[in-house]
């Protein structure tokens, strides 16, 4: 694992959140569906919120890196076995082929849709939140995971 890439990727959710949840993007709609007010937001301990958010984001980046960096696939399982020359050749031929921003972004996007959406959607349904709430929050995580996945996969 590239620790520097993980630490940098941990900043992405904050940057995306700063833009995405701005009043002129979806911030006003988000505040409406969550019942958040500017006064209530100012009451939070921002040092703790940002510090813990960053720690959680680095944790997320560490597991996301295992999802987006998988360039050798099945061939890598058998590449060490001297009897499997074909697998060695396939592993070598595909070694860096899938270490691109585009490839990581694709897998980050898929992770957002097939992991974040079901988790957030299930929680929101039990909390009796509406679809607007779900799509606002899922949209944030799909964008965030797409960018994190791209960065983590491309940074070698």
Image: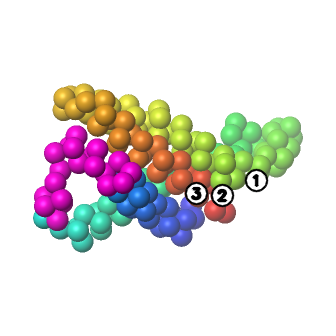
Tag 2: Cα neighbours inside 10 Å, few (<14), some, or many (≥20)? some
Q: Is residue 26 magenta?
A: yes
Q: Nearer the viewer, mark 3 or mark 1?
A: 3
Q: According to the image, label 2 marks what residue? A: 154
| Residue 39 position (above or below residue 93) | below
Measuring from the top left, give residue 14's x and y in whole percent: 39, 61
Residue 88 in which image quadrant: top right
| Residue 130 position (above or below residue 29) | above
Viewer-nearest residue: 90 or 44: 44
The residue drawn where x is 43% and y is 36% is 115
Q: Is residue 38 left or right of residue 56?
A: left
Q: Which secondary structure type mostly characterizes the magenta part of the structure?
A: helix
Measuring from the top left, give residue 72's x and y in whole percent: 71, 44
SS of the residue at dot 3? helix
Q: Is residue 105 visible?
A: yes
Q: Which residues are magenta?
A: 23-42
Tag 1: Cα neighbours inside 10 Å, few (<14), some, or many (≥20)? some
N-term-proximal mark, 2 vs 1: 1
Residue 81 in which image quadrant: top right
N-term-proximal mark, 3 vs 1: 1
Asked if disc 2 and disc 3 are in contact, CB closer than 8 Å, the reply is yes
* Distance (Cα) linking label 2 and label 1: 10 Å
The residue drawn where x is 16% and y is 45% is 35
Determine which of the numbered discs, if any, sits on residue 152 in the image: 3
Residue 139 in which image quadrant: top left
Q: Is residue 96 left or right of residue 156?
A: right
Q: According to the image, label 1 marks what residue? A: 96
């Amino acid at each position: 694992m590239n620790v520097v890439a993980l630490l940098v990727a941990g900043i992405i959710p904050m940057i995306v959140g700063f833009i995405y949840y701005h009043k002129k993007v979806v911030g006003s709609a988000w505040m409406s569906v969550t019942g958040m007010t500017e006064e209530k937001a100012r009451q939070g301990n921002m040092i703790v919120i940002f510090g813990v958010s960053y720690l959680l984001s680095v944790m997320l980046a560490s597991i996301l890196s295992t999802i987006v960096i998988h360039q050798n696939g099945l061939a890598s399982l058998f590449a060490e076995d001297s009897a499997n020359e074909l697998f060695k050749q396939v592993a070598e031929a595909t070694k860096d082929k899938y270490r691109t921003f585009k490839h990581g972004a694709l897998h980050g996007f898929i992770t957002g849709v097939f992991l974040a959406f079901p988790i957030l959607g299930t929680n929101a349904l039990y909390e009796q939140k509406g679809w607007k709430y779900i799509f606002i929050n899922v949209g944030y995580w799909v964008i965030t995971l797409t960018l994190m996945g791209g960065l983590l996969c491309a940074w070698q």
